[in-house]
Image (cartoon, rainbow, N blue to C red):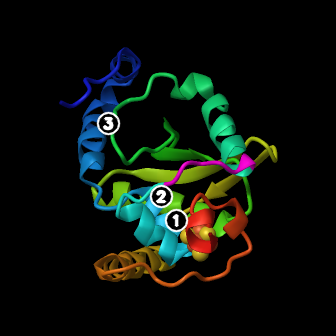
Amino acid sequence: MKKPYSSRCVSFLTENPNLSGLYILMLVDKRELRYKGTQVAYYVVCKRKLWLFSKGISYEHTSEWVALGKFLDEQSFKRQREDDFYEEPVRIDFITTEEGIVVHEIKHSTAIESAHFLQVKYYLYYLRSKGLKVSHGVLHYPKAKKIQKIYLTEEDISFIEKTLTEIDKVLKLPKPLPVEEKPYCKECAYFEFCYG
Ligand code: SF4
């Protein structure tokens, strides 16, 4: 059963009546996103990881790095996130508005920034493809005290469309791609599976 819109969401819509239709459309349509933003990011990070994650193969997050990330993720921007708009696999961390929707994503490390950029651009792409007016995205790195603004270009759109096609191909494979040594493998939740 779908979670009803939260009181925070309802009060936001009440305070911004001109955005009500837009937000309701967005909240509904986000449920139809074919791929999670995480999957799009994993395409850049590691195609083997993309496959494992997408097939529901998960491992206990034992590395300190992953634990730190989880902690930061839970603590940072707690106020904005304490009352989520919806309960769905696809989650934009939070949204504000300027001259259109501003998508915010919180990350604990800048190590795989290119994947984070693509994830946020994917959200912008998706919302825009639904006819919504998007402004830009903001990546927050609370640990590094860094903020990155992200804009969606025509080149990005064609890259995202190609990426989605490539994700389809990876997920049709009967087994994951072989281990490909990456500098961040030791911090990956699948490290023991891949190297054990
Ligand atoms: S440990 Fe390395 S090869 Fe294995 S899934 Fe993670 S990033 Fe990919």
Residue at 81%, 47% in the rendered image: 144
The Cα–Cα distance between marks 1 and 3, rounded to whole angstroms, is 25 Å
Q: Secondary structure at mark 1?
A: helix
Q: Does the rendering let one see residue 45? A: no
Residue beneath label 2, please?
Answer: 38
Q: Which residues are magenta?
A: 59-64
Residue at 63%, 61% in the rendered image: 188
The Cα–Cα distance between marks 1 and 2, rounded to whole angstroms, is 5 Å
Mark number for residue 23? 3
Q: Which quarter of the rendered picture does the N terminus lie within?
A: top left
Q: Main secondary structure of the magenta part?
A: loop
Between disc 3 and disc 2, the foreground one is 2
Residue at 33%, 51% in the rendered image: 132
Q: Is residue 29 left or right of residue 176?
A: left
Type of amino acid at the residue the image marks with label 2: Thr
Residue beneath label 1, please?
Answer: 41
